[in-house]
Amino acid sequence: MGELGCVLLPQYYGKGYMTQAIKLAVQFGLETIKLAQVGAITSNDNEGAIKLMNRLNFIKVADLPDNEIEYQYIKP
């Protein structure tokens, strides 16, 4: 399983960079290196990341310790 991690400087928020980067990373993982799954983890406080995960077909699979949430990509 692949896991995504990302950080974006505030001056680049809302410009679509992370949406495009995550789409490409998921595509690469699934199609090129043949990962069976792609997961992502974020904190409950990170509203932007939560919206991004929901928009890109990730589903919440677990509440984790330390105020974190685990997501898994679901192919549309």
Image (cartoon, rainbow, N blue to C red):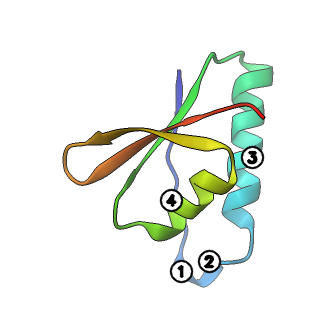
Q: Nearer the viewer, mark 1 or mark 3?
A: 3
- Pair 1/4: label in front: 4
Q: Check disc 4 and give the amino acid type.
A: Ile
Residue 12 in which image quadrant: bottom right
Amino acid type, label 1? Pro
Rounded to the nearest whole Å, what is the CA distance between mark 2 and mark 4?
14 Å
Q: Is residue 55 left or right of residue 24?
A: left
Amino acid type assigned to the residue bearing label 3 in the image:
Lys
Q: Position of residue 2 (x, y in %)?
A: 55, 27
Q: Earlier in the sequence, mark 2 or mark 3?
A: 2
C-alpha gap between disc 2 and disc 3: 16 Å
Q: Position of residue 36 (x, y in %)?
A: 63, 16
Residue 27 picture location, percent across and down: 77, 34
Q: Quadrant of residue 30?
A: top right
Q: Which mark is residue 10?
A: 1
Question: Do tag 2 and tag 4 residues touch (Cβ < 8 Å)?
Answer: no
Q: Residue at x 34, y 67 (%)?
A: 45
**Could you give the CA–CA distance between mark 2 and mark 1, rounded to whole angstroms?**
5 Å
Residue named by callout 4: 50
Residue furthest to the bottom in view is 11
From this view, report whether residue 47 is shown above or below residue 73: below
| Callouts 2 and 3 close, C-beta under 8 Å | no
**Disc with the residue nearer the chain's start (2 vs 4):** 2
- Residue drawn where x is 61% and y is 59% of the image: 52
CA neighbours of label 3 inside 10 A, class few (<14), some (14 to 19), many (20+): few
> If you read the primary sequence from the N terminus, does the residue marked by circle 1 or circle 4 appear first?
1
Q: Earlier in the sequence, mark 4 or mark 3?
A: 3
Residue indicated by mark 3: 23
Q: Are marks 2 and 1 in contact (CB under 8 Å)?
A: yes
Q: Secondary structure at mark 1?
A: helix
